Image: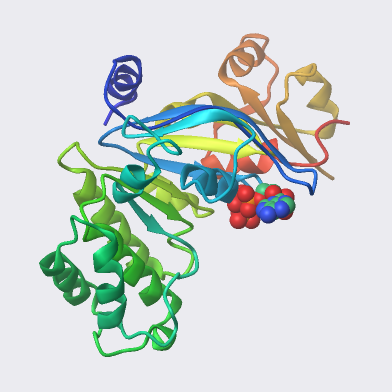
Amino acid sequence: MTVDKLQGVMQDSAPLALSIDGVTKRYDSGFTLEDVTFDLPAGYIMGLIGPNGAGKSTLIKLILNMIRRDAGSISVLGMDNIRSEEATKEQLGIVFDTHYFIEAWTVRKAGQAMAPMYPTWNQQAFDSYLRRFGLDERKKVKELSRGMQMKLMLAVALSHDAKLLILDEPTSGLDVLGRDELMDILHEYIEDGAHSVLFSTHITDDLEHAADFITYITGGRLYYSGPKDEFEDSFRLVKGGPEQFELLQGRALGTHHYATGFDALVSVSAAENLRDGNAHLAIEPVSIDDIIRLTNIKENSR
Ligand SMILES: Nc1ncnc2c1ncn2[C@@H]1O[C@H](COP(=O)(O)OP(=O)(O)OP(=O)(O)O)[C@@H](O)[C@H]1O
């Protein structure tokens, strides 16, 4: 989908799968997830990214009402996630980075234990996902690899017609084939326009393949939420020798200095000014990894 179309979706009053408004969470440890606001339109996949400790899992726990928020509101498919907690949870499919089953359960028992929790449980769908994922019904949860445990959670999440799938680091236990397979399944899942996905990840390749939107959090604050392509198109990477750094005149949003020069992240407009000023700097497109790396670098200036 093109950036223009995605921007249109965000501006339209398209139905929202998820709406996060001014959400704040303070931990005693001193970390605060501060005033986070963004929407996920229904029918799309959003990647939630940020470095370790950025607040991604905290945000997911807040959406699931597993921890208490200090301010703001969250609505899932138009329902307040606290006032309509039960109805909200029926519409959510959850895949965590570690499984939530009892280790001694077999795969079959895990399905039987989950089924009564969802009025819309579809046993045929569950059985067919087990076959598709190569999950042996007789195997115990503790005998499954991490990737297979993730697939079991996914089979549960997809078998009760959840409208919003939330996945916390789903690809961390998967090899390249498993990751591609998961991304294919997510695409199939949203195809009808009524289903949506929010997934957190450290693996930016996953975003390239799957995400329509990106929400980037760092240090508990929202840095960007919007179409994926626009995220990369908003910045440029400027490279130069040590003596050229002063040409940037404070326009760097993040800089990595080497013995032989520097890499700096600048806005597109700053990059255009540098080009117009004939600064003889190398100006290149950025990857999502460059943006995360340079906006989190400790040594930001000289
Ligand atoms: N229950 C808690 N009490 C106090 N501090 C917490 C608690 N849970 C998380 N934190 C702190 O909140 C910050 C954000 O943690 P969170 O797990 O949300 O980050 P994350 O972006 O998911 O990181 P990662 O990518 O490493 O999983 C961290 O500094 C963490 O130590």
Q: Quadrant of the N terminus?
A: top left
- The answer to whether residue 214 is seen in the rendering is yes
Location of residue 157 by image quarter: bottom left
Q: Position of residue 131 (x, y in %)?
A: 17, 76
| 158 on left or right of 99 | left
Q: Position of residue 273 (x, y in %)?
A: 64, 11
Q: Position of residue 296 (x, y in %)?
A: 71, 40
Residue placed furthest toward the right: 302
- 60 and 146: which is toward the camera: 60
- 301 and 163: which is toward the camera: 163
Location of residue 237 by image quarter: top right
| 61 on left or right of 198 | right
Q: Residue at x 89, y 31 (%)?
A: 302
Q: How many marks?
A: 0
- 113 and 41: which is toward the camera: 113
- The answer to whether residue 155 is seen in the rendering is no
Residue placed furthest toward the left: 124
Q: How is the image coloured?
A: rainbow
Q: Residue at x 58, y 48 (%)?
A: 67
Q: Residue at x 25, y 56 (%)?
A: 184
Q: Residue at x 70, y 17 (%)?
A: 279
**Vertical relation: 153 (above or below) 252:** below
Q: Position of residue 23 (x, y in %)?
A: 58, 31
**Vertical relation: 84 (above or below) 15:** below
